Image (cartoon, grey):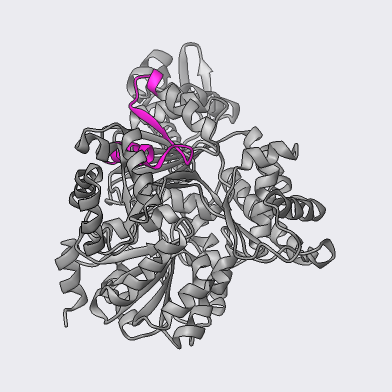
């Protein structure tokens, strides 16, 4: 059996582990439930990928974001490792085929969105899988006291009801001591086992700047810090505005947010990753799973809602160990808006109940129906129909999601997919009878391997170029083959899914706990107030503030944040003034001097010696006699 280091070298070509990786890997190999708390950039993925490659069976990875899931699966496949995913953006047939492959296809990783873990089809298939262990990525999502609570995470331990006892490894970059304990409790760890890295980043300088001219401040920093940069903003519109401003000033910048197509986002990300674009201005949709070492500067153009989010995003700077900067720009308007967010994020309970009924009614589900159903959901159309503010509706849906009633997925950009639903002999007979389709079918088989074993993503434009057809002609032939029962064809679509997790309840049966609602709101407010306290902090080292927030009591001042630098300059300033005063006394002890003589001898270009002489005169230390300055008192 290969050692962990052998596997690391074989698939990732690294010579050594990062701090704590080997300890976590060994804990997993010993079948211990493990909570790994490593800061952003600490290499969390390898902590489960390496033991999964060593152990027999398939590793199930629970992950909250479809985009992140797809990236990790693609990354593993590029290394020759068999991996697949099952998430809410897939059809029933696709899920069926993927789960069959997980059982019979000799795969090492199955990435699973948490809501899929509760489905009957998964429960049935999971009982037939040889599962090595379960991974819970972004594990803070299981805690309602964390900053990104997702109630579907509470269902993860139900997998063990089907499979029997299995080791669990939970990973997160951001968890307070309370959240860490809650994670282990919620996942029913057989015994507490927390492996926790230190949170200091010795090469990362945290800087907070109060600014009424954020564009100007940002431009000044970008011009002074060479290398790749990320600028985080709150809204999509702002991402485009700020990137346009930077381009107008000659900076290579681009915007990134979930409103762009998957292909466009990939293109923008690749250009930034490869250094074609220097600055990416993005909502928080950017950065998860990206491992780019030479990010020199991360800026929060808008004040973040929590220390957890800020710490994770800021931590994307300087992963190569070289000096980097995390800058937060703020002004009084930011503080006011941040304090208003709680009322938007937590609509009144009566409004939550109103939105609940409207959602089911919008899709024509009567009382007692709708459970397990899903549909493409256009938030703008829904809000417009009922004459409601879009953001208020969105947060109402997200709160209903936290109660386990519905699930609104991230915006999914699904490419078209096909699969042959006849066997090869039947297909050959169809080709003989349909000469006009024969060459097109051959092209499909040549372009895409594995069309008989599962649904594969296709690109109609690419097929059109290769076959020298128009895109419309390709779509027409795919539809024709689908109607003939030759292929399953799922045209591409781009929108979030609204999943109804429970049957529609009557108003009297709909329960939303007022005490739970208030606790969550209070917790949210506490997190925003921690951010406000952080930006207003004037004496405590930024790094020490952040590490203490996450429960690391012992620590040291970083020496490179704005507060530490300010303290050092203040100390140096006092020392400098003391040196000037000492030099003045030395000069005047020799003999009385004129101002011209003092100026030439004191070597003080700043002119501070004039203020010091005035203070000495006020205190009676020196006196003026004609043109000469005379020392009255010396230093004891």
Looking at this rendering, what residue extends furthest in the right direction?
508
The residue lying toward the viewer, choosing from 69 and 442, is 442
- Total labels: the figure holds 0
Q: Position of residue 493 (x, y in %)?
A: 46, 44
For the magenta stretch, what is the residue range? 247-273
* Picture quadrant where residue 588 is located: top left
Magenta stretch contains residue 269: yes
Looking at this rendering, what residue extends furthest in the top direction?
626
Q: Position of residue 633 (x, y in %)?
A: 50, 34
* Picture quarter with the N terminus: bottom left
532 w.r.t. 251: above or below? below
Q: Position of residue 452 (x, y in %)?
A: 27, 62
* Picture quadrant where residue 294 is located: top left
Residue 176 visible, this orientation? no
108 w.r.t. 569: above or below? below
The residue lying toward the viewer, choosing from 28 and 328, is 28
Left or right for 289, reference 336: left
The residue lying toward the viewer, choosing from 487 and 125, is 487
599 w.r.t. 142: above or below? above
* Picture quadrant where residue 143 is located: bottom right
- Image point 37% across, 79% down: which residue? 133
Left or right for 338, reference 187: right
- Image point 52% across, 63% down: which residue? 550
Magenta stretch contains residue 70: no
Q: Position of residue 480 (x, y in %)?
A: 36, 45
Residue 136 visible, this orientation? yes
- Image point 70% across, 48% down: which residue? 362
The residue lying toward the viewer, choosing from 56 and 228, is 56
């Amino acid at each position: 059996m290969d050692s962990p280091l052998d596997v690391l070298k074989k698939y990732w070509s690294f010579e050594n582990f990062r701090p704590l990786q080997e300890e976590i890997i060994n804990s997993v190999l010993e079948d211990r439930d493990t909570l790994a708390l490593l800061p952003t950039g600490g290499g969390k993925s390898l902590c489960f990928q390496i033991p999964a490659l060593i152990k027999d069976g398939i590793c199930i990875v629970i992950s909250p974001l479809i985009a992140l899931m797809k990236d990790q699966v693609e990354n593993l496949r590029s290394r020759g490792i068999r991996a697949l995913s099952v998430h809410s953006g897939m059809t029933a047939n696709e899920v069926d085929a993927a789960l069959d492959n997980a059982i019979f296809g000799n795969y090492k990783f199955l990435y699973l969105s948490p809501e899929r873990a509760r489905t009957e089809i998964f429960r049935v298939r999971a009982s037939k899988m040889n599962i090595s262990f379960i991974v819970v990525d972004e594990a803070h999502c299981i805690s309602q006291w964390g900053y990104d609570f997702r109630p579907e995470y509470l269902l993860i331990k139900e997998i063990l009801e089907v499979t029997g006892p299995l080791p669990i490894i939970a990973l997160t970059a951001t968890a307070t001591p309370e959240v860490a304990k809650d994670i282990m409790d919620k996942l029913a760890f057989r015994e507490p086992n927390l492996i926790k890295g230190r949170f200091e980043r010795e090469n990362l300088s945290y800087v907070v700047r109060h600014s009424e001219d954020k564009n100007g401040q940002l431009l000044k920093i970008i011009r002074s810090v060479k290398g790749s940069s990320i600028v985080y903003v709150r809204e999509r519109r702002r991402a485009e505005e700020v990137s346009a401003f930077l381009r107008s000033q000659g900076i290579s910048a681009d915007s990134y947010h979930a409103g762009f197509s998957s292909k466009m986002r990939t293109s923008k990300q690749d250009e930034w990753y490869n250094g074609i674009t220097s600055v990416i201005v993005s909502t928080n949709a950017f950065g998860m799973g990206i491992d780019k070492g030479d990010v020199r500067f991360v800026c929060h153009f808008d004040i973040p809602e929590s220390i957890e989010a800020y710490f994770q995003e800021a931590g994307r700077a300087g992963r190569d160990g070289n000096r980097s900067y995390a800058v937060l720009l703020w002004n009084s308007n930011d503080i006011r808006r941040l304090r208003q967010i709680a009322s938007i994020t937590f609509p009144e309970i009566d409004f939550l109940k109103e939105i609940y009924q409207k959602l089911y009614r919008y899709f024509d589900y009567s009382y007692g129906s709708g459970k397990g159903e899903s549909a493409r959901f256009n938030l703008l159309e829904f809000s417009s129909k009922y004459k409601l503010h879009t953001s208020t509706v969105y947060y109402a849906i997200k709160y209903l999601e936290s109660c386990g009633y519905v699930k609104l997925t991230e915006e999914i950009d699904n490419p078209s997919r096909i699969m042959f639903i006849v066997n090869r002999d039947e297909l050959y007979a169809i080709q003989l009878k349909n000469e006009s389709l024969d060459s097109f079918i051959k092209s499909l088989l040549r372009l895409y391997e594995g069309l008989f074993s599962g649904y594969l993503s296709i690109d109609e434009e690419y097929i059109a170029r290769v076959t020298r057809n128009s895109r419309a002609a390709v779509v027409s032939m795919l539809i024709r083959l689908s109607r003939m029962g030759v292929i399953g064809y799922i045209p591409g679509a781009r929108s979030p899914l609204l999943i109804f997790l429970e049957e529609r309840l009557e108003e009297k049966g709909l329960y939303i706990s007022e005490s739970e609602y208030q606790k969550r709101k209070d917790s949210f407010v506490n997190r925003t107030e921690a951010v406000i306290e952080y930006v207003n902090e004037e004496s405590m080292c930024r790094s020490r503030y952040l590490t203490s927030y996450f429960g690391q009591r012992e620590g040291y001042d970083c020496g490179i944040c704005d507060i530490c630098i300010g303290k050092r300059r203040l100390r140096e300033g006092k020392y400098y003034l003391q040196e000037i005063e000492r030099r003045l006394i030395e000069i005047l002890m020799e003999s009385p001097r004129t101002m011209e003589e003092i100026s030439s001898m004191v070597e003080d270009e700043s002119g501070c010696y004039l203020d010091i002489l005035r203070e000495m005169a006020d205190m009676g230390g020196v006196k003026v006699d004609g043109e000469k300055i005379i020392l009255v008192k010396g230093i004891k």
